[in-house]
Image (cartoon, rainbow, N blue to C red):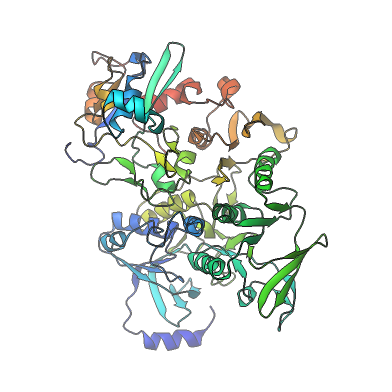
Amino acid sequence: MKSKNDNRKNNKMFKDNETIDYLIIGNSAAGLAAAESIRELDKSGEIMILTGENYLNYSKPMITYFLSGTVNLDMIHFKDDKFYKDNRLDVRLNTRVKSIDTDKMFLITDDGNRYEFRKLLIASGGRPIVPKIKAIGTKSSGFIDGTNYDKTEGIFTLTNLEDAVRVKNYIEKNGIKNISILGGGLIGLKAAEAFLEKGIDVNIIELADRILAATFDREASGIIEKKLKSTGSNIYMNNTIEEIHIGSGKITGYKLKDGEKMECRLLVIAVGVNPDTGFISSGSLDMARGIIVDDHMRTSAKNIYAAGDVVEGPDMISGGKRNIAIWPLAVRQGTAAGLNMAGGNKKYGGGFFMNSVELLGIPSISMGITNVAEEKEGFEVLKYLNTNQDMYRKVIIKNNRIIGVILVNNIERAGIYSGLIRNEIDISSVKENISREDFGIIHLPADYKKHLVVGEGIEV
Amino acid sequence: MRERHGDCKMKKIYIQEEYCIGCRLCEIYCQVKHSKSKKIIKAFKEEMIDILPRVLVEEIGYNSFAIQCRHCSDAPCVEACISGAMQKNKNTGVVTCDEDKCVGCWSCIMVCPYGVIRRNLSGKKIASKCDLCIDEEIPVCVQNCPNEALKFMDKDAKEKNPVGTKTGRKNEK
């Protein structure tokens, strides 16, 4: 592990420190679900939560709702003070982890403190990706990247509340009426949704040939693109920012790959998020893109668990491991991790990707594998498209099981599909009904229908 | 007001689909219950468009049943809720959506395997679902079902009196 010096110094400094029963890195969905579950089984053990952030609690997916003004800072929490008090959680704000000694079971934070633990949960979430872009007019490097982008006024990422507060203040202070967003994926479009609601025009720059390329198919992307364009927004597809223009420390514009020069006073970089694993030294834990965990959310190191956006966990659809950074799975993983840390035996059971986003009044939900080459690999695709009403429904089937769904505009009862995916229900007997607009429980295979209707409640 | 009880003794609504005649009185009484006036004529004349029934009758031909939130013990809607609006009460077991906190992200709709949460767009966007009429002795959909197609009981009672039979005889399978 990194620094013996640090350890000695901190050892001395914090001689009296007791070993913490349950140490949790991360104060969001996974970390708090774990804390709550630990407390269910262990009423007395000490639970400490470390977070690099300055807010006691807020919901990360709600930062764009804060931007649009739907919620204010008082309403953005998903757990209240009482939750922390009732579960007796010792939260340390502004405490970023620097390194972990997985063998000796302690970690060191940026401020030099040392924390020994009996059980550790890594639920550190994700960090925004900032691509290296040529910059003209900077005093220093000539490039914008992850280390220096925030030194230029008007360039932001948008993955935590501090980002959102800064963007909001910047808009208000500078009377911004037009925002460029690099990246037409989920974060980019959630940001676009918020800006459009505030009456701010957006330019979306997307590397692929359509927006939401990872979660939508061509038809669904097309419906949203058409709507976006009708509001006066611009989408630049097959494109990216080649150089950023800076004057007096502020962004003034940029040049696109196709040569077009754009004026810009506020740029949001939303090309994606990587698992936040910078504090994990290579070789100490099995990692791919994220930390690899088993079905009990155990990492490769004893007594160390991981959950949420930082992990690569069991993927129900592929059967392999995958980083699926979504809220519901973070909570589920955190719950399983917490119970197991406290001596329980809880299987996570795997998950699959899903997302709900509403853009310009068009709600949409996608789940599982949404974009497949039908002819290949035995996929079957059922579609319902009503172009006049921008209504779209697509169900992807493999081996008589649903593996993916896209719903645009009519999202009612979407969860019935997630139940079918999760429970791997054979839908061959009801295939003709599966993409109906009024699809409901009554159309389901008889056994599964009976299970839902007559049962006590299904295992979910 | 009903007695407070843990999840295992929690009274739930059980569906006897064989007895549902598709009259939709459950939907109507649910709408009235969740109206401002609480009066059937007034509610229908003035508030109807704004009130979604929180129980849903599904029907094909003579086959029908009414379904509402099952108040799951591991409720996926609570897990998926990004705002903390969707909560399962630890004492009563009832899952409710705090409409002040809800931001209408529809994550709950995405995960509910019963498809019994709906979008309420009459004011601020919020999720609309069964609250089990917590201030009533018996939920109004059950109270007003003319054919006992909905029953309100705890798990023990359900096991003694299997759903799907009127007399209590074991359901043939």
Residue closest to the far right: A259
Horizontal and vertical percent for residue A273? 60, 60
- Image height of A395 relative to A62, above or below: above
Horizontal and vertical percent for residue A102? 48, 71
- Image height of A24 relative to B54, above or below: below
Would you identify the image quadrant in which residue B34 lies? top left
Tell me, yes or no, if residue A288 can be seen here: no
Horizontal and vertical percent for residue A13? 38, 87
Q: Quadrant of the C terminus of chain B?
A: top left
- Horizontally, residue B160 falls left or right of residue A77, namely left
Q: A127 or A47, which lies in front?
A: A127
- Image height of A88 relative to A386, above or below: below
Q: Residue at x 37, y 42 (%)?
A: B74
Horizontal and vertical percent for residue A446? 47, 20
- Image height of A185 relative to A241, above or below: above
Q: Residue at x 67, y 52 (%)?
A: A233
Q: A149 or B4, which lies in front?
A: A149
Residue closest to the far top: B62
Q: Quadrant of the N terminus of chain B?
A: top left
Q: Residue at x 49, y 40 (%)?
A: B110
- Horizontally, residue A360 falls left or right of residue A55, namely right
Tell me, yes or no, if residue A360 can be seen here: yes
Q: Residue at x 41, y 33 (%)?
A: B116
- Horizontally, residue A374 falls left or right of residue B135, namely right
Q: B154 or A14, which lies in front?
A: B154
| Circle count | 0
- Horizontally, residue A425 falls left or right of residue A268, namely left
Q: A103 or A199, which lies in front?
A: A199
